[in-house]
Amino acid sequence: MVELSFFDEGDLVAVLTAQPLDRLLDYKAPEGGCQTGAFVEVPLGPRKVLGVVWGKGAGGFDLSKARSVIRVLDVAPMREEMRAFLARAADYTLTPMPAMLRLATRAPGLGDPPSMRKILRLGQGEPDRMTDARRRVMEVLREYGGLAFTLRELSEMAGVSSPVIKGLIKQGVVVEEDTPRDMPYPSLQPEFDGKDLNDDQAEAANQLRNAVATGHYGTTLLKGVTGSGKTEVYLEAVAECLKQGRQALVLLPEIALTAEFLARVEERFGARPAEWHSGVTMTERRRCWRMVGQGAAQLVVGARSSLYLPFRDLGLIVVDEEHDSSYKQEDGALYSARDMSVLRATCCSAQVILASATPSLESWANAETGKYQRLDLTSRFGVAEMPDMRAIDMRAETLSSNRWISGTLKKEVSARLELNEQALLFINRRGYAPTTICRACGHQIGCDQCDARMVEHRFLKRLVCHQCGETKPMPEKCPNCEAEGRLAPVGPGVERLAEETAEVFPDARIAVLSSDLFGSARALKEKIELIAEGGADIIIGTQLVAKGHNFPHLTLVGVIDADLGLQGSDLRAAERTFQLMRQVSGRAGRTEKQGVALLQTYQPEHPVICAILSGDEEGFWRAEAREREATGVPPYGRLAGIVLSSPDVQQVFDLAGEMARQDAPLRAINAQIYGPAPAPIARIRGRHRVRLLVKCEKGAPLQKALAAWVAQFKLPSAIRLSIDIDPQSF
Ligand code: ADP
Ligand code: ZN
């Protein structure tokens, strides 16, 4: 649609800012006028803040008092579809518009002129004398002449110190050029190096290409066992999208996966895409944000927040590992990146591909009803087969105390080591031990601020609260009874399992993969590469290893505690355990060697464990669906979690009780309220948390009712309220 609303100098315009205000602010349009969607700088009290022209000003006050827009920023105006998306996302998640705008402007110095940097190229000069180091520099520049290097990049590539390069610059052998940091990204070529697809893959790729070619909205669930080539297939859809001249976005659940993925994209399309996540530098963010807006970034690979980038013409969103719970997190707004992708795509007529080996029940159900198209890849690519899955019945094993590797598992691992193959031992627990207990009085060390135990991390040499991140040194005495030397670890964490493994297999090379052990994304990447190349015999890992990595030498997966996720009252426990166990098992046997996955369990008859072992996914989903349908919870009913928090426990319970009683707006839509009850985590950072759950039927206008209901109450300033539509745990 053509944007017609243009405002002349002095016209009153309404501006949305990212400040916590509940309304738009009126300003006079600046000299030269401005259009709807323009990014502007406006005065607010003594400050200057960023805003977006949202439409015509409301007026109704003394216009001579109106202040003027200071300047229109030199960036592409926010498109109408983006404004519609932000407004609809705000309505859906009940997030105030300023918070939505903050999500959409997460790049520094948006409107400032770009900073420059020095780029090095080969000049005309000849060096006064040749050394090995100088020769290497010149060779690198000659060979990669098309690329631009900074001083640091060049010294890394050539393996020389920077004075060597500076010396060459003095002699004109190497020349420096000022280049703006906001360079367009190198262009991706859809036909650069496509793989030959097998029949299943080709069929799926065709369907996806056709969907992209329609230029309309649509969502496809691409379900394929791990290693079936989902990535290859959806890259074909990306290729089609690029051919259409539109932009594409691939969301990944974990930054640790990005490096591997970028390399794959480069292989496929001949150039690197833009990258957007918390590990990207500020200058790169600014570049990405601006280039995406100009259409000069064809493909973005990123974390969930990349959904809010200002794409000029977004034609495809891929959500890889769509079931992953990290897609739902607090970012200043509570949203599920999967659901927001669908919303965003409807606003800009794009296609969505949800890819997973173990889809969420929501997506499975949407495919059942035909709301989503579903494509299946049922076998692994090439000769690789899905691993054999078996239970190890822990009731029949004898283990000495503080030991977790059963005799059966030990034998299987030894057999793999003999064959020079890799084994993975999986435990979904960070740190050394989940609990530290005093052997004298039984006291467990907890976090002072939260309702959580402190977890011992030997590697960090601290106790860590996994809720709030608080750390403290391990005390010498029991904080309760002051007994000395009686504190002892209870239960296994990944670090403790590593210790046991080293004792049981003294000659094996052991690599531990847990997020705490890596200071940087690069260190993690190096470790992953080392493992992939066969530089380790046994891998010990937390759920970091369950996601996406390709370890070709890995043929055995041993799950230390398959029952872990089934405890607790979370209704999604079954779904999560099923997904995690299938994912982690799928790491085994990705090449011609047959893989095995062994699950240590005390309840091999448990229906979820049985479903995991048999691989009867459709059966598992149908059973889960029936249960959820019977209780009217998502995806068969709607839920919202309202969490009130305050340092004062009485105050927060009182208000929650009051809210539960004054429920007329909710009763009007036949919604039920459960609670107040302590939230799943009852205290975080010293704030007590109380939760109300609201449940209603699928078609009911839940958000409207919630808004009207919450508006009835005036919150004391000490109380915070957050609303979570479609909460993850219920
Ligand atoms: P998934 O995303 O389903 O786990 P991938 O796309 O990562 O699967 O594929 C698994 C492995 O098989 C990768 O190493 C990939 O390069 C390879 N592969 C898949 N399909 C093909 C193909 N058609 N030709 C060559 N290699 C393929
Ligand atoms: Zn804490």
Image: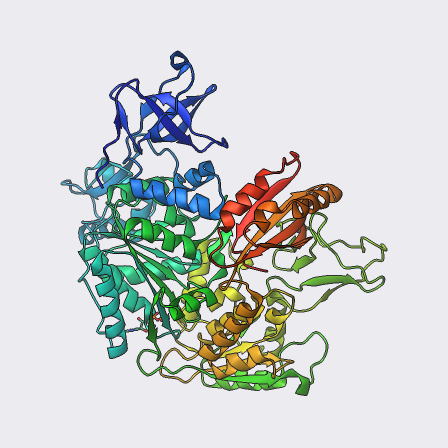
Residue 330 in view (yes/no): no
Q: Looking at the picture, tell me which residue is in the foreground, 387 or 239.
A: 239
What is the number of callouts on the image? 0
Quadrant of the image containing the C terminus:
bottom right
Q: Looking at the picture, tell me which residue is in the foreground, 81 or 43.
A: 81
Give residue 448's position: percent from left, percent from top: 72, 48
Query: Which residue corresponds to the image point at 73% horizontal and 44% vertical from the top-left?
Result: 649
Chosen colour scheme: rainbow
Give residue 280's position: percent from left, percent from top: 40, 47
Q: Looking at the picture, tell me which residue is in the foreground, 80 or 163.
A: 80
Give residue 721's position: percent from left, percent from top: 60, 43
Identify the residue at the far top of this view. 64
Query: Which residue corresponds to the image point at 62% horizontal and 49% vertical from the top-left?
Result: 468
Query: Going by the image, does 608 lie left or right of 65?
Result: right
Vertical placement of residue 593 versus 271, above or below: below
Quarter where residue 571 is shown: bottom right
Quadrant of the image containing the N terminus:
top left
Identify the residue at the far left of this view. 124
Vertical placement of residue 174 versus 633, above or below: above
Vertical placement of residue 529 versus 618, above or below: above
Give residue 384's position: percent from left, percent from top: 36, 81
